[in-house]
Image (cartoon, rainbow, N blue to C red):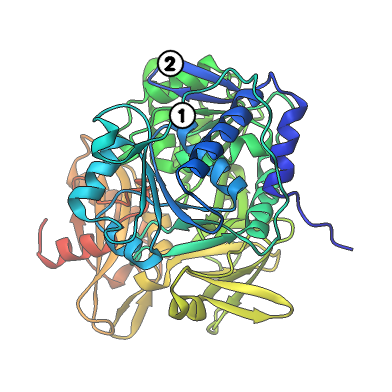
Amino acid sequence: MTVAPDSVFTRLARLTEHPRATVLVRCAGALSGQDVTAAQLLDGCRRTADALRAAGVRRGDKAVVMTRDAYHLVACVYALISLGAVPVLIEPRAEVRRCLDEIAPGVFIGEPLAHVARRALGWGRGQVRTALVTGRGLPGRLLGRSLPLAVPDGSGPLPPVPEPRPDDLAMIAFTSGSTGQPKGVEYRCATLAGQLAALDAVLRAEPGDVLLSCFLPFAALGPLLGLTTVAPQVDHLAPARTPPGSLVGPLRRHRATHVLGSPAVLGLIAGHCVRHGLTLPSVRRVLSFGAPLRPRLAEMLAKALPPGAEILSVYGATECLPVAAIDAQELRVRPPAGHVGTCLGRPLPGVRARILDADGTGLGEIAVAGPMVSPAYHARPDATRAAKSLADGALWHRTGDLGRLDGEGRLWYLGRSAHLVIGEGFALTTEDIEAAADTAAGVRRTALVGVGAAGRQRAVLCVEPEPGARRDAVVEALRAVLGDHPDARRIATVLFHPRFPTDIRHNSKIDRARLATYAAGGRR
């Protein structure tokens, strides 16, 4: 008999066992921070829920939460879920208005700047009936009703933690939109429970562990996973521009045992440690997500870590997180015959993977099933039908990623199906070329794009060089690492770009559509 994973509410109730333990640290730079105990967090959630109820928020209401403050985010998300309302997480971007028109939220909770944008850009116009302002800034009365969110002393009664039905809608989180229009992913209560259980398997947390979460939404999950969660002050509109000291300072001061971030942010940490001769002796496990982890970055990180520390590349998507994980040591292993690209590791416990529409080499679209798979896109039935299917007693999600399964049950990633470069008589997957090209000396990263109509595309390898690298030396290094590659001759042009455009969420996923436009212009 399969035992259902612990729900959000079961995990919240577990926080009452150690009321004085610090569960969240909100940082405001490299040095300062505020510790929040379990009692304070739960008391704050109860007070926030009371304030939301008094403002008219009811069960089933969809409520956008847009704040950069970790405590405000966690208190609002937990409070909304406890009321049976549905928090909606979305990043400030040009598509916000379209996204909100799609889901029609009745409540908008956010810091003053978010409300200024809401008013100026028409976010949720005609739909938002309750506007609640968090934090300090412009007078709240001009933007909406003030929502008190000061950290309490923790002396108040604990909030009720009702157990919902597994199929109740718990949250909507929008995809990054890095490969198309953002979509609202529905998390049922059972979905969140499945995600938390899968993350338990990746984190392998022990009592007293401390997580440095460099991705703000994950700060809402850290306390539920039993880790003291340190939320550094990341530039959430451009994570790669975060001052490295704002990451390394809190990490070292709070002796983080786990670090979670995208390759762009982990690169900031590793580079800062190398430049300043710093080590991170408390860290046991680093989790990289959002884009493939390259061996070069893993090696730079390892220099700052103690012997035996693990660096894991975690694979997943907003619709199914996490799916698989692989240790950096395994990333260096040469693939078996017929398996190129980047190894993602084996699916996590309870997760199944298969390859759909495979060709003669086993290459096809990766599909996954498991308790962490979201059941639907909100208000997007066509997208749901295209991505979800029932088979073998499970709901399967088509990821849009190309890959293979090897004889040991490991997944290999070859890139997004939407990024396949199709020319006359050939089809190139991005990861097949880039995994090799990225190893060339003087190369920071590469991106293979197609210029022209599918079927007649010209393959262009875009190169972002390391600072100070000579172009002629980089081209020679690329020739060396791609010399034996069977498809290297298909590359028509090598094009240098000073800094690749990337996604807003992680600054790690390359915006290939913009690069293809750049390449079509013939810039060199």
Residue appearing at x 40%, y 70% in the figure? 429
The answer to which image quadrant residue 520 occupies is bottom left
Residue 355 to residue 38: above or below = below
Q: CA distance from mark 2 to mark 1?
A: 40 Å
Residue appearing at x 42%, y 59% in the figure? 175
The crowd level at tag 2 (other Cα within 10 Å; few <14, some 14-19, many 20+) is few
- The foreground one among 213 and 99 is 99
Residue appearing at x 65%, y 62% in the figure? 410
> 446 left or right of 295?
left
Where residue 256 appears, x then y in whole percent? Answer: 58, 24
- The foreground one among 296 and 233 is 233
Residue 462 visible: yes
Q: Earlier in the sequence, mark 2 or mark 1?
A: 1
- The foreground one among 97 and 237 is 97
Marking on residue 238: none
> 224 left or right of 432?
right
Marking on residue 277: 2
- The foreground one among 195 and 123 is 123
Instruction: Determine which residue is flagged by label 1.
Output: 149
> 22 left or right of 53?
right
Where residue 5 appears, x then y in whole percent? Answer: 76, 53
Indicate the amino acid at tag 1. Leu
Indicate the amino acid at tag 2. Gly
Residue 3 to residue 369: above or below = above
**Does dot 2 land on a helix, a strand or a loop?**
loop
